[in-house]
Structures are given as C-alpha cells and as structure tokens.
C-alpha cells in the first residue's frame, strides 16, 4: 500500500456500485488471486475514459479481462478496445469473461506476447488514443518504445504499478537482489516518460502508483 490502508478503504467506501457483471468479475478475480486494478485505480480509469472519450483503446495486460470490461463499460459508442494477454491460464478466463460483457462486440483480445503483438499492430498501421499499460513491469520500456508511436498526438498513456508498493523510493541496496532489475528499470521508465519533451507526465499515488502521460507531439 502506498497510501495508508484506512485511507484506501475510506476512498473505496465512497464508490457507488458497479454493474452486477463487473462486480462479479472483480469478486471472482480477487478470490482467485488475480492481480487486477484496485478500487481507486478503477475510479481513475473510468474517469479518464469518460473524460477523454477515446475512439480506440489499447490495453497491455488483460489478465482475466476485468479492467478491459470496466473500460468497455464506460467507453463511448463507436470506440473499440484491443487488449493483449499471453498467459493461457488467464486467457481461458479472459475469453469467456470478455465474450459476456455488454460491449463484447467492441473488444478484440490478442493472444500473444505483448512485445510481438505491439510490433504487429505497428506494422498494420494501427493507432490508439488511449493506452493502458499493465503488464510485466520489467518490460515497460520495451513496450513504451513500441506503443508510443501508435499513440495519437493528444492521446494519453496510463501506466500502472509504477511505484511498486512504495519500494521505488528505496535504495537499490535495500531491494532484494532478485528485484533489483525491475526496480532499476522502473526508475529508468519513470525518468524517460518524465523527461521526454514530447510528453507531459504526472505520477500519482493512486493504487500501486499510476503515471498519466500526454503525448503532445510525434
Ligand atoms: C496486473 S495483470 C493485468 C490486470 C488487468 N489489467 C486488470 O486490471 O484486470 C498483468 C497481466 O499481464 C500479463 N502479461 C505480462 N507480461 C506480458 C507480456 N509480455 N505479454 C502479454 N501479457 C503479459 C500477465 O500474464 C498478467 O495477466
């Protein structure tokens, strides 16, 4: 928790109920230990989708389809959502869950490694005005390299888990050896999205830390 647990619980308690199918999807995912976005991140994602009214959404990291289902619920008519997942165990559920959502016909599930899928989407000349990155943290920089060219000017990239349960502020010597690579790569990633003059990024302590990035120019 990067904010006090009681505060997170209080903020979550303010949320109004979600449509029943989303609430059930969330409950099942949590019972099965699937790492889905937290309540406060859900509210932010919903807010951004309703505010920005994207025509095309790309999600990197579907898991069982909860955040994709959430975004699809609030995306405008005519918007299409593409989401990428590579782990079969997750895909089994994602296929079923996403086929059952209200906007099922507006969702494409790509079953592939994200890096490969992003390269294919680029070759196809695809572009998106909203990207939600929520997959292997150590690969964020590689995903960025391939996703950013597909983000339209004026588009927004949301990156999840950037504060790594708060450990991002720890010295690398305080981080367990096996986690040091991810720690270093996340710091590099944050530096990159904060210092690229074509981007404006705000890093916020919501959920496990989210970075909101606006692409100002190509
Ligand atoms: C945190 S979960 C996504 C949660 C989901 N966005 C939600 O909130 O409902 C991250 C997912 O990314 C997937 N993933 C990790 N690395 C990937 C890669 N290189 N290609 C495709 N999927 C990947 C994992 O299998 C996992 O299901």
Image (tube, grey):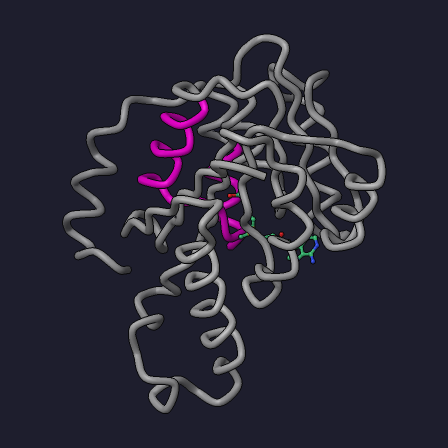
Relative image position of residue 125 (x, y in whole percent): 79, 33
Whether residue 74 is visible here, answered yes or no, is: yes
| Bounds of the magenta segment | 25-49
Nearest the viewer among 210 and 153 is 153
Nearest the viewer among 135 and 217 is 217
Q: Is residue 37 magenta?
A: yes
Q: Is residue 22 magenta?
A: no
User: Looking at the image, which residue is at 49% across and 80% down?
Assistant: 179
User: Looking at the image, which residue is at 33% across and 22% down?
Assistant: 17
User: Looking at the image, which residue is at 33% across and 72% down?
Assistant: 167
Relative image position of residue 196 (x, y in whole percent): 47, 54
Is residue 130 rendered to the left or right of residue 85?
left
Relative image position of residue 210 (x, y in whole percent): 38, 49
Placement of the C terminus among the 4 image quadrants: top right
User: Looking at the image, which residue is at 35% across and 34% down?
Assistant: 44
Q: Answer above or below: position of 161 versus 20.
A: below
């Amino acid at each position: 928790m990067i904010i006090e647990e009681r505060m997170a619980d209080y903020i979550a308690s303010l949320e109004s109920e979600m449509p029943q199918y989303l609430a059930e999807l969330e409950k099942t995912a949590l019972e099965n230990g699937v790492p889905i976005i937290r309540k406060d991140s859900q509210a932010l994602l919903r807010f951004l989708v309703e505010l920005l009214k994207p025509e095309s959404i790309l999600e990197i990291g579907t898991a069982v389809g909860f955040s994709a289902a959430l975004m699809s619920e609030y995306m405008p008519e005519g918007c299409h959502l593409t989401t990428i997942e590579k782990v079969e165990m997750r895909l089994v559920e994602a296929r079923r869950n996403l086929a059952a959502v209200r906007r099922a016909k507006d969702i494409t599930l790509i079953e592939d490694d994200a890096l490969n899928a992003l390269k294919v989407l680029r070759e196809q000349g695809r572009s998106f005005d909203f990207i939600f990155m929520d997959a292997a943290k150590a690969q964020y920089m590689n995903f960025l390299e391939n996703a950013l060219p597909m983000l339209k000017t004026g588009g927004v990239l949301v990156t999840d888990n950037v504060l790594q349960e708060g450990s991002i502020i720890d010295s690398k010597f305080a981080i367990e050896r096996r986690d040091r690579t991810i720690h270093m790569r996340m710091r590099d990633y944050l530096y990159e999205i904060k210092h690229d003059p074509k981007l404006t990024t705000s890093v916020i302590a919501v959920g496990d830390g989210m970075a909101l990035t606006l692409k100002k120019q190509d």
